[in-house]
Image: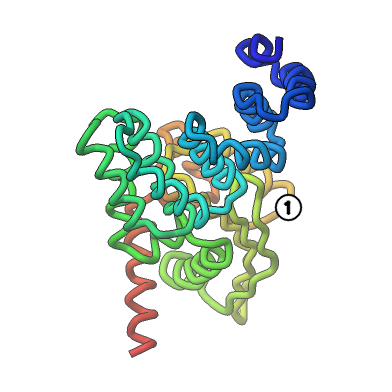
Amino acid sequence: MGICNYNLNRFREAIECLIRVIQTNHEDYESMYYLANSFYNTGRNDDCLKYFGRLKKIPQYMFDANLMIANTNKRLKLYIQAIEQYEGLISNVGLKNDKMLDIYYSIADCYFNTHNLSRAIAYWQKIVATSPDYKDVQQKIQTYSQVNSNSMLEKYLIGSMNQFTNICKLFVKYYIPKFSHLKGNIKFLNIAMNQDNSLEIYAEVSNRNFVEQVYFSFMRSNTTVGDFIVRNIYNKLKEQKIDKGICVTAGNFSDTAKQFVESRMIELVEKNQLTDILSDIGRILQGQNE
């Protein structure tokens, strides 16, 4: 009954049945295997690790148990541990090609999340060498190969929150003197991180004659930003009586978004301009350190 429930994706019911089986027979490894997977599928990570930890010494379940332990650690954002476990599995003799590709993809994802982009790209390239159409690997290589050659853009896209925030502040200090009609002293009024990983910066620009409030929205996405997001930002500017908004993305804006901002006090910064600005900021910082 437990296995039937598992195959029907009724994992909670499966757990109830399989626990009873294991309480009766502590060496029923098949039931333990399905129980551990049920815990994984319900997000009960500690229980999942507990039972897979028992199975990793059983020859029949050794590989799958170690793979699921690595997957669970990856889910828990214990990326270094997960990488070590995945790489330990690669040397497994007789490993099927599809399993190997899945492991390579997971390792690359872990390296990406630890901000080691060059290692992530190396594993994506291993995947492409075997299976060019595997998932979104071609797109990832195309997107992040350029990023890897620009350390500032890399930190903008996949750096830590502190790195991302610092780069956005440097962007504001660069953008206002370079592109704004009003130039003067820059004061940061508020900086806030949103749930979607975007960053908001409220800044004030002042000189002897004028004061202007400017709102910056920094999006880490490298996809297309539609007019819905831009409209929300425009409504925010009106409600809070902010003079101007700057929307920045590592991707691009849709045609409808560009049409919407025409004749409105919103400026759009897409990937190419962002890359150029971050390259200039990088050169300035390098010159200051020399």
Can I make out residue 207 in this image? yes
In the rendered image, residue 118, in percent from the top left (x then y), is placed at 32, 58
Amino acid carrying label 1: it is Gln
Q: Is residue 242 left or right of residue 94?
A: right
Residue at image point 39% right, 39% down: 103
Residue at image point 25% right, 44% down: 125
In the rendered image, residue 120, in percent from the top left (x then y), is placed at 36, 51
Q: What element does badge 1 sit on?
A: helix
Residue at image point 40% right, 43% down: 89
In the picture as drawn, the residue positioned furthest to the bottom comes out as 290
Residue at image point 39% right, 60% down: 153
Q: Is residue 155 left or right of residue 51?
A: left
Can I make out residue 181 in this image? no
Viewer-nearest residue: 256 or 167: 167
**Crowding near pointer 1: few (<14 within 10 Å), some, many (20+)?**
few
The count of marks equals 1
In the rendered image, residue 59, in percent from the top left (x then y), is placed at 48, 34
Scheme of colours in the image: rainbow
In the picture as drawn, the residue positioned furthest to the left comes out as 129
Q: Quadrant of residue 69?
A: top right
Viewer-nearest residue: 77 or 26: 26
Quadrant assignment for the N terminus: top right
Residue at mark 1 = 240
Viewer-nearest residue: 147 or 232: 147
Quadrant assignment for the C terminus: bottom left
